[in-house]
């Protein structure tokens, strides 16, 4: 870890905002005392912990990020109905499969977000990632077409992430 | 209590509980570990989301102010469910758990286990 | 109507818990049992939330949040322990 050349009051602004909101949600209030205490914690905790963080690419585009989050929430609901139908239906009709998906994005944070999205949405669970972070192994509950699934994940989830993180 | 709030809360509660049940049903009846993993990670997460949404609506109506702290549990479960699923899949691969015979690309588990490219 | 919905929801969640318990007993491998325990803690959060709605208090929110956090940490710890044990062999 290199020493910091200058002192920043907010070394991790995103984390500060999340901490502040989480504190207010935890206490379920917007009373002035909790606003002050939350602001203090939101400044103090990142100052204490910023030295432990690995540098990650930041969120470049807020609007694209919000659109991505809304799309994922919608997809979670749709995928849940599909998985529910598959679970209730006869288990003999299922065609489980392992699929390796080539990754274009780099860095740990975008890959983690992609793997989490893949686990939550289209009937897939991310199982493992290759050592060089170029391939994502997923398990599919009911595979109909391998190329279609890879194209769906790359087109629908990976491309927006690539745009958001510029990598 | 107004009728439509009661209706919305009741629908959310029953739908959420049905999804929780479907997740556990998948855990109980599906044939191998990797397929079992799908039920709890997806259906249970949405079920909990529905139950907590019902709680948010009801408490907001009863107390008279916006009460969002149940959202914290929803967010927490939404973030941790994929992590748990990933770690369990990893554990299962390292244990060489038996895989259903009709699974296609079964050989990929060996490559994934050693984290090498396919 | 709401009290009926709460009773129905609680019944469904209890059936889900029994199914999890069954998987915990028969589960062929250790990962199956960890998965069953993981689902059980999520379902018990559901039960606590339903009890909170039933009794009309928000007191149980902290308990639910604590179970969510400790459950995740314990699942991660158990997975890590099994993975490490296997790796060292």
Image: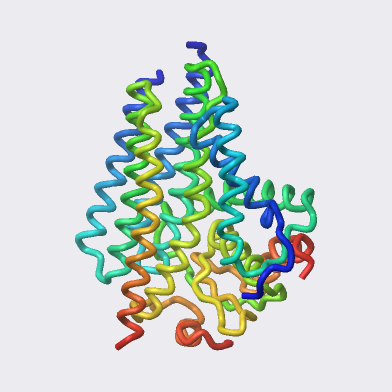
C61 left or right of C17?
Answer: right
A57 left or right of C28?
Answer: right
Where does the N terminus of chain A fall, quadrant-wise? bottom right
Query: In terms of depth relative to the viewer, which is nearer, B80 or C27?
Result: B80
Q: Say above or below: A85 vs A49.
A: above
The image quadrant of residue C83 is bottom left
Q: Residue at x 26, y 58 (%)?
A: C23
Q: Residue at x 47, y 49 (%)?
A: B77
Image location of residue A112, percent across then percent down: 59, 66
Q: Residue furthest top?
A: B1
Q: Say above or below: B9 vs C87.
A: above
Please name the colour scheme applied to the rendered image: rainbow
Q: Residue at x 27, y 51 (%)?
A: C19
- Is any atom of residue C2 visible in this view? yes
Where does the C terminus of chain A fall, quadrant-wise? bottom right
Q: Say above or below: A14 vs B88.
A: above
Q: Say above or below: A10 vs A39.
A: below
Image location of residue B72, percent across then percent down: 51, 41
Image location of residue C67, percent across then percent down: 35, 46
Q: Residue furthest front?
A: A6
Image location of residue A166, percent across then percent down: 79, 66
Q: Residue at x 67, y 51 (%)?
A: A14
Query: In terms of depth relative to the viewer, which is nearer, A88 or B81?
Result: B81
Task: Give the mark count.
Answer: 0
- Is any atom of residue A155 visible in this view? no
Query: In terms of depth relative to the viewer, which is nearer, A48 or C33?
Result: A48
Query: In terms of depth relative to the viewer, which is nearer, A129 or B23?
Result: A129
């Amino acid at each position: 870890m290199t020493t910091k050349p200058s002192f920043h009051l907010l070394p991790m602004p995103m984390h500060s905002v999340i901490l502040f909101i989480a504190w207010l949600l935890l206490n379920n209030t917007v009373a002035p005392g909790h606003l002050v205490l939350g602001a203090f914690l939101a400044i103090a905790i990142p100052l204490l912990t910023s030295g432990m963080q690995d540098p990650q690419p930041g969120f470049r585009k807020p609007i694209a990020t919000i659109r991505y989050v809304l799309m994922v929430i919608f997809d979670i609901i749709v995928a849940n109905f599909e998985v529910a139908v598959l679970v209730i239906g006869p288990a003999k009709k299922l065609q489980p499969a392992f699929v390796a998906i080539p990754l274009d994005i780099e860095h740990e944070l975008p890959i983690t977000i992609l793997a989490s999205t893949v686990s939550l949405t289209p009937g897939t669970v991310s199982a493992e990632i290759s050592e060089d972070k170029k391939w994502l192994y997923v398990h599919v509950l009911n595979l109909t077409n391998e190329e279609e699934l890879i194209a769906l994940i790359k087109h629908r989830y990976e491309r927006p992430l690539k745009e958001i993180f510029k990598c | 209590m107004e009728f439509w709030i009661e209706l919305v809360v009741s629908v959310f509660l029953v739908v959420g509980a049905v999804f929780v049940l479907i997740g556990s049903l998948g855990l109980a009846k599906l044939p191998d570990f990797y397929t079992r993993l799908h039920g709890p990670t997806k259906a249970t997460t949405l079920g909990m989301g529905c139950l907590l949404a019902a709680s948010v609506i009801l408490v907001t109506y009863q107390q008279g102010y916006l009460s969002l702290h149940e959202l914290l549990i929803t967010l927490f479960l939404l973030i941790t469910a994929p992590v748990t699923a990933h770690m369990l899949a990893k554990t299962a691969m390292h244990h060489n758990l038996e895989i259903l015979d009709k699974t296609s690309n079964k050989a990929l588990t060996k490559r994934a286990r050693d984290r090498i490219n396919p | 109507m709401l009290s009926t919905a709460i009773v129905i929801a609680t019944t469904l969640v209890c059936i889900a818990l029994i199914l999890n318990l069954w998987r915990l007993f028969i589960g062929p491998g250790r990962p199956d049992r960890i998965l069953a325990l993981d689902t059980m803690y999520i379902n018990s959060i559901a039960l606590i939330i339903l009890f909170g709605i039933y009794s009309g208090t928000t007191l149980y929110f902290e308990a639910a949040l604590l179970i969510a956090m400790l459950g995740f940490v314990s699942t991660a710890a158990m997975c890590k322990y099994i993975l490490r044990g296997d790796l060292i062999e």
